[in-house]
Amino acid sequence: MKKVLIISSSLRAHSNSDALATAFAEGAREAGHVVECISLKGKEIRFCTACYACKKTGRCVAPDDAPEIISKIQVADVVVLATPIYYYEMCGQLKTLLDRTVSIYNEPYTFRDVYLLATAAEDEPSTPERAFNGLGGWVECFEKARIAGQVFAGGVYEQNTILGHSALETARKMGAAI
């Protein structure tokens, strides 16, 4: 049994990336894993100011919601990130959160497998490449971690247009296979 943390970064209600996150969570729960889902909706995530106070305190000192989320990332076995693609990249709120994980860069962490679930209005196969590469750069900084999988649902723009998309089943099966 693994501890799975799913972070959905879309700020839109009933978002397509939320649907991918839900499908992944269903699969992981079916397989007997403990799953926690966090939405960045309503969360305050400030930019990293490179003050490096975290290097002295062991945690980010900015007074917002990021330190609590980062502490959950640090102790999860599996981290799943769901994002809409904006201008061919992960959304800004997710990137901002990942930037804030500098506070655990030299600290012990348990996550090994990282997954990216992405949605976009564009349906070209190359659409999510930059987001996947951006995540790859983050994962590379955590030497024991790896990108274990990715799911992309293209051609979904309006809320709930992902319903019936094959990516939902792919995400559910991926969650069940961890």
Image: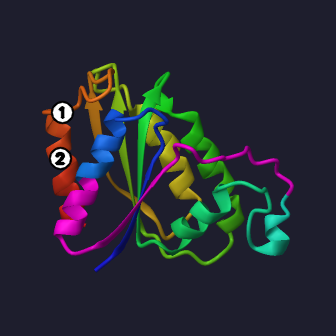
Residue at position x 14%, y 46% in the image? 169
Name the kind of residue labelled 1 in the image: Leu
The label number, if any, that marks residue 55 in the structure image: none
Name the kind of residue labelled 2 in the image: Thr
Choose top left, top right, bottom left or bottom right for residue 177. Answer: bottom left
Residue at position x 33%, y 21% in the image? 157
Q: Is residue 102 left or right of residue 178?
A: right
Q: Is residue 35 magenta?
A: yes
Structure colour scheme: rainbow
Helix, strand or loop at label 2? It is helix
> Is residue 45 depicted above or below 53 in this figure?
above
**Cα distance in 3D space between marks 2 and 1:** 13 Å
Q: Is residue 135 left or right of residue 122?
A: right
Mark 2 surroundings: few (<14), some (14-19) or many (≥20) residues within 10 A: some
Choose top left, top right, bottom left or bottom right for residue 141. Answer: bottom right
Identify the residue under disc 1. 163
Mark 1 surroundings: few (<14), some (14-19) or many (≥20) residues within 10 A: few
- Given this view, does label 2 or label 1 mark the residue nearer the observer? 1
The label number, if any, that marks residue 170 in the structure image: 2
Whole-percent x and y of residue 102? 69, 59
> Is residue 143 depicted above or below 84 in this figure?
below
Q: Quadrant of the C terminus?
A: bottom left
Whole-percent x and y of residue 134? 52, 41
Considering only order in the chain, which callout, 1 or 2, is on the residue closer to the N terminus? 1
